[in-house]
């Protein structure tokens, strides 16, 4: 797939919204604020920011908030996602969040990455998902 310039719609709007969400992040321990913005298949704009916790392992990534907002506002599929750091620079989701985004958007979800726009099938090839669980069931 050819890379899509980040200056084209909807990326410009999503970068702005991700930066706005990042400024609301709660990151008193690491100081590493992250914002995420995405679009659902019905056009809804979704955002998330990271929320840290003194018990480090229970902090929430920005992408978790975005996927939670997707579910809380009616479900559907993600079509476009971008994540930014405190300087509003594009960053890659961590492995856990790549899994979350993959399940919420499928292999065709477009992610603005540090190397351009990529479908989730390239960002997380051979992803583990609901099909793998179904196949593992007896008689599946």
Image (tube, rainbow, N blue to C red):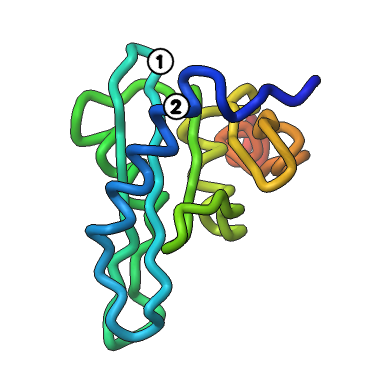
Which quadrant does the N terminus fall into? top right
State the residue in front, 100 or 137. 100
Q: Residue furthest left?
A: 73
Q: Is residue 137 visible?
A: no
The crowding category of the residue bearing disc 2, from other C-alpha atoms within 10 Å (few below 14, some 14 to 19, many at least 20), is many
Residue 41 is tagged as 1
Mark 2 = which residue?
78
Q: Is residue 106 left or right of residue 127?
A: left
Where in the figure is residue 27, as x and y percent of width and height? 31, 74
Secondary element under disc 2, as helix, strand or loop, is strand
Residue 111 is tagged as none
Where in the figure is residue 46, as x and y percent of width and height? 30, 33
The residues tagged by marks 2 and 1 sit, at their Cα atoms, a distance apart of: 6 Å
Q: Is residue 82 above or below residue 139?
A: below
Where in the figure is residue 112, as x and y percent of width and height? 60, 36
Q: Is residue 126 left or right of residue 57?
A: right
Q: Write the residue at 63% across / 22% down.
A: 108
Q: Is residue 17 left or right of residue 132?
A: left
The crowding category of the residue bearing disc 1, from other C-alpha atoms within 10 Å (few below 14, some 14 to 19, many at least 20), is some
Q: Quadrant of residue 111?
A: top right
Q: Is residue 126 above or below residue 44?
A: below
Which quadrant does the C terminus fall into? top right
Q: Write the residue at 50% across / 27% down.
A: 11
Where in the figure is residue 130, as x and y percent of width and height? 55, 35
Secondary element under disc 1, as helix, strand or loop, is loop
* Labelled pair 2, 1 in contact (Cβ < 8 Å): yes
Q: Is residue 51 visible?
A: yes
Q: Is residue 29 above or below residue 84?
A: below
Q: Write the residue at 38% across / 52% down.
A: 35
Q: Earlier in the sequence, mark 2 or mark 1?
A: 1
């Amino acid at each position: 797939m050819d890379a899509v310039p980040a200056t084209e719609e909807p990326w410009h709007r999503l970068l702005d919204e991700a930066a706005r969400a990042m400024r609301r992040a709660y990151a008193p321990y690491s100081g590493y604020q992250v914002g995420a913005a995405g679009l659902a298949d019905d056009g809804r704009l979704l955002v998330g920011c990271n929320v840290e916790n003194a018990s480090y392992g229970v902090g929430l990534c920005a992408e978790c908030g975005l996927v939670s907002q997707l579910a809380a506002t009616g479900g559907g599929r993600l079509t476009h996602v971008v994540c930014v750091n405190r300087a509003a620079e594009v960053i890659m989701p961590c492995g856990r969040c790549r899994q979350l985004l993959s399940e919420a958007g499928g292999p065709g979800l477009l992610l603005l990455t540090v190397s351009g726009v990529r479908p989730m099938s390239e960002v997380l090839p051979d992803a583990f998902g609901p099909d793998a669980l179904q196949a593992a069931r007896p008689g599946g």
